[in-house]
C-alpha cells in the first residue's frame, strides 16, 4: 500500500511536470509568433520609409528641374501603400511641365503599363514604350543633364517595385544614362500608338467589345478608348 501511494504521488508529479512543459511550450510558441509579427511590422515600416525616401527624391528632383527630365521607369500600378507617393510625383510632374520642363518617360511595352502611361501623359510627359526595355535592374531619372536619381529594386534581376533610391550629381553618369535612354527612345512606340495597337488586337479577337469593357480590361479611362475609336483607330498626335 505504501509503494502504491508513492507511485501515485510520482505519477501526479510527472503529470504536473508534463502539464507545466506543455504550458511553457504554448507560451513559447505564442511569444515566437508575437516576435514574428513584430519583426514583420518592423520590416514593413522600414520598406515604407525607404520607399518614401525614394519618392521624395523623385518629387524634389522634379521640383528642382529647370530644363529636362528623362526617365526610365517600371510603369507598374501603385500599391495601396505607394498610391499617395505616386500622386505626389504626378503633381510634381504637372508643375514641372507648367514651368516648361521637357518630360520624356520610357516604359516597358506591356498592356499592364498603359494605366501609368496615361497618368504620365496627363501630367504632361511624352511617354513611349519599348519591348526591349528591361527595368528590373536599372530605373532612373536624369535631370537637367547634371543629376540622376537611380532606383533600386528589392531584388536585382526581378520585377520588383523600387525600394530605395540614390541621388547622384555627375554629368558623366548622366551622359552614360542618356546613351542608354536614347538607345530605346528613337525606336520606341508612343503611348497613343501603343494604346491603338492593343485596342486593335483586342477588337480583332472580339469585335463586339464595348469601349467600357476595353477600358476596364486595359485599366484606362473610357474617354481614352472612345477618343481612339472615334478617330478610326488612328493614334492621336
Image (cartoon, helix red, strand yellow):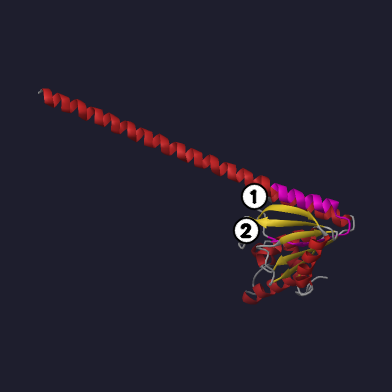
* Secondary structure found at label 2: loop
Element type where label 1 sits in the image: loop
Categorize mark 1 by other alpha carbons within 10 Å: few (<14), some (14-19), many (20+).
Answer: few
Image quarter of the N terminus: top left
Q: Residue furthest top?
A: 2
Task: Give the Cα separation between the discs numbered 2 and 1.
Answer: 15 Å
Using the image, determine if residue 130 lies above or below residue 38: below
Tell me the magenta residue range.
52-75
User: Vertical placement of 172 versus 58: above or below?
Assistant: below
Is residue 13 magenta-colored?
no
Which residue is found at the position 64% from the left and 49% from the top?
Answer: 80
- Tell me residue 149's x, y (percent): 76, 56
Q: Can you tell which quarter of the image residue 28 is in?
A: top left
Decide whether residue 59 is among the magenta residues.
yes
28 on left or right of 69:
left
Mark seen at residue 80: 1
Front position in the image: 3 or 204: 3
First in residue order: circle 2 vs circle 1: 1
The residue lying at 39 percent from left, 36 percent from top is: 26
Spot occupied by residue 87 in the image (x, y as percentages of width and height): 74, 51
Residue at (62, 74) in percent of width and height: 206
- Circle 2 Cα neighbour tier, 10 Å, few/some/many (<14 / 14–19 / ≥20): some
Instruction: Nearest to the eye among marks 2 and 1: give it.
Output: 2
Confirm or deny contact between disc 2 and disc 1 (CB under 8 A).
no
Q: Nearest the camera: 62 or 237?
A: 62
In the drawing, does residue 103 fall left or right of residue 38? Answer: right
Q: Is residue 128 visible?
A: yes
Where, by quadrant of the figure, is residue 144 drawn?
bottom right
**The C terminus sits in image quarter:** bottom right
Dot 2 corresponds to which residue?
160
Amino acid at each position: 500500500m505504501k509503494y502504491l501511494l508513492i507511485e501515485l504521488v510520482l505519477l501526479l508529479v510527472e503529470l504536473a511536470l508534463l502539464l507545466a512543459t506543455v504550458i511553457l511550450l504554448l507560451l513559447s510558441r505564442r511569444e515566437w509568433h508575437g516576435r514574428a509579427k513584430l519583426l514583420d511590422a518592423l520590416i514593413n515600416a522600414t520598406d515604407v520609409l525607404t520607399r518614401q525616401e525614394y519618392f521624395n527624391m523623385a518629387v524634389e528632383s522634379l521640383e528642382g528641374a529647370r530644363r529636362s527630365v528623362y526617365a526610365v521607369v517600371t510603369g507598374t500600378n501603385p500599391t495601396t501603400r505607394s498610391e499617395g507617393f505616386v500622386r505626389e510625383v504626378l503633381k510634381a510632374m504637372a508643375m514641372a511641365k507648367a514651368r516648361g520642363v521637357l518630360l520624356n518617360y520610357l516604359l516597358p511595352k506591356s498592356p499592364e503599363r498603359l494605366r501609368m502611361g496615361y497618368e504620365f501623359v496627363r501630367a504632361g510627359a511624352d511617354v513611349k514604350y519599348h519591348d526591349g526595355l528591361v527595368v528590373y535592374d536599372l530605373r532612373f531619372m536624369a535631370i537637367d543633364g547634371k543629376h540622376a536619381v537611380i532606383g533600386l529594386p528589392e531584388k536585382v534581376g526581378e520585377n520588383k517595385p523600387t525600394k530605395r533610391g540614390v541621388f547622384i550629381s555627375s554629368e558623366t553618369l548622366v551622359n552614360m544614362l542618356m546613351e542608354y535612354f536614347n538607345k530605346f527612345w528613337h525606336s520606341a512606340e508612343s503611348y497613343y500608338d501603343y494604346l491603338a495597337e492593343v485596342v486593335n488586337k483586342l477588337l480583332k479577337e472580339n469585335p463586339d467589345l464595348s469601349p467600357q469593357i476595353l477600358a476596364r480590361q486595359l485599366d484606362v479611362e473610357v474617354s481614352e478608348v472612345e477618343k481612339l475609336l472615334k478617330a478610326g483607330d488612328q493614334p492621336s498626335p
